[in-house]
Image: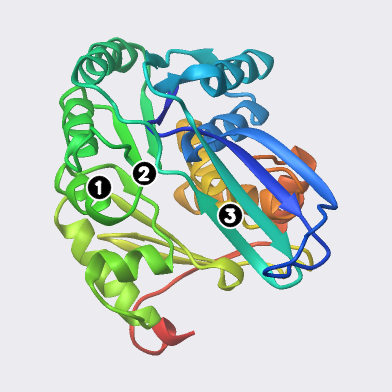
Amino acid sequence: MIATITINPAIDIRYNLPAFHLDEVNRVQSVDKTAGGKGLNVSRVLCQLEATVTCTGFLGGKSGEWIAEQLSIWSLENQFVKIKGETRFCLAIESKEGHTEILEQGPEILENEREEFLKNFDIILGSNQYIVASGSLPTGIDSNFYRELIEKTNQKGKYFLLDSSGESLANGIKGKPFLIKPNKEELCKLIGLNDVSLEDMINHSLEICRKGTKFVLLSLGKEGALLISENKILKAIIPTLTNVHQVGSGDSMLAGFTFAHSKGYLIEDVFKWSCACGMSNAASERTGSIELSQVQHFFNQIKVEELVGGKEWNM
């Protein structure tokens, strides 16, 4: 029922250090190695929610083989297209100083590999109601690629959820996806502003919805989240977490939304599921990982309010 697209997957390695010092030897306290790329983070969370998930994108080289092995361990259906290039590595360094990411660009995708993906996508689209595409595009894939996939999905009357940034997000919006999931920084970049107020975020998101996107799911970190459509604006107020691991939390939100919407829940509860999954990942030491009992706990603590304009927009 649910398919995820990870166009530019990676082996994600997260280093946890007590402190991070430039120009010095840093000794790692713990290491977490996962089959990554945002779409695969979504896939693992959906799997933990007991959804059946088909995964597609591009995999190549020894690192691609390692990721394929991980898909088998997680019982995720592997519909990735094999490529000549080598799947990338991405590093995340977490310490008391903050969170730093070092991301490889990824392999170049050849034209015949792109065409093979599109043929494969048509097959996947025939048997899945929800398509979730996440992450950056590698060299060889132009910024209109997501828009092309969205339009194919819309023609079949199915749901396309997009989590990207920059040109690929801007062009993807033109295809009228069911949902986009930017964070505040990505929204600022999309609309060409350095900073925005809550009212600005709502107004720009409403404009996006008026052009054909059904929902804008806007993650705001510790400030919660917004879910915006043409006829309803919801704000989630979340409890405070003491230890927060950022990587994969937005992907977990997207997984939670997709899962809950596929079950036909009320939109307020879909939103709460989304936020609860994001929080559970943030509380975990592993990327793209949740605990169902914890998700339920957070679900019961999250408060969702409908905003109607004026002073409420400045909460």
Name the residue tied to disc 1. 168
Name the residue tied to disc 3. 275
Q: CA distance from mark 2 to mark 3?
A: 23 Å
Disc 2 residue type?
A: Ser
Residue placed at 58% from the left, 22% from the top? Answer: 67
The image shows residue 220 at horizontal and vertical percentages of 50, 68
- Indicate which disc, 1 or 2, sits on the residue closer to the N terminus: 2
Q: Secondary structure beneath disc 2? A: loop
Q: Nearer the viewer, mark 1 or mark 3?
A: 1
Residue placed at 62% from the left, 26% from the top? Answer: 47
Proximity of marks 2 and 3: CB atoms separated by less than 8 Å = no
Q: CA distance from mark 1 to mark 3?
A: 25 Å
- Tell me if mark 1 has few (under 14), some (14-19) or many (20+) residues whose alpha carbon lies within 10 angstroms of its own: many
Colour mapping: rainbow
- Indicate which disc, 2 or 3, sits on the residue closer to the N terminus: 2
Residue placed at 46% from the left, 31% from the top? Answer: 262
- Looking at the image, residue 286 lies above or below residue 222: above
Disc 1 residue type?
A: Ser
User: Among all residues in the image, which is located at the extreme bottom?
Assistant: 311
- Tell me if mark 2 has few (under 14), some (14-19) or many (20+) residues whose alpha carbon lies within 10 angstroms of its own: many
The image shows residue 181 at horizontal and vertical percentages of 40, 52
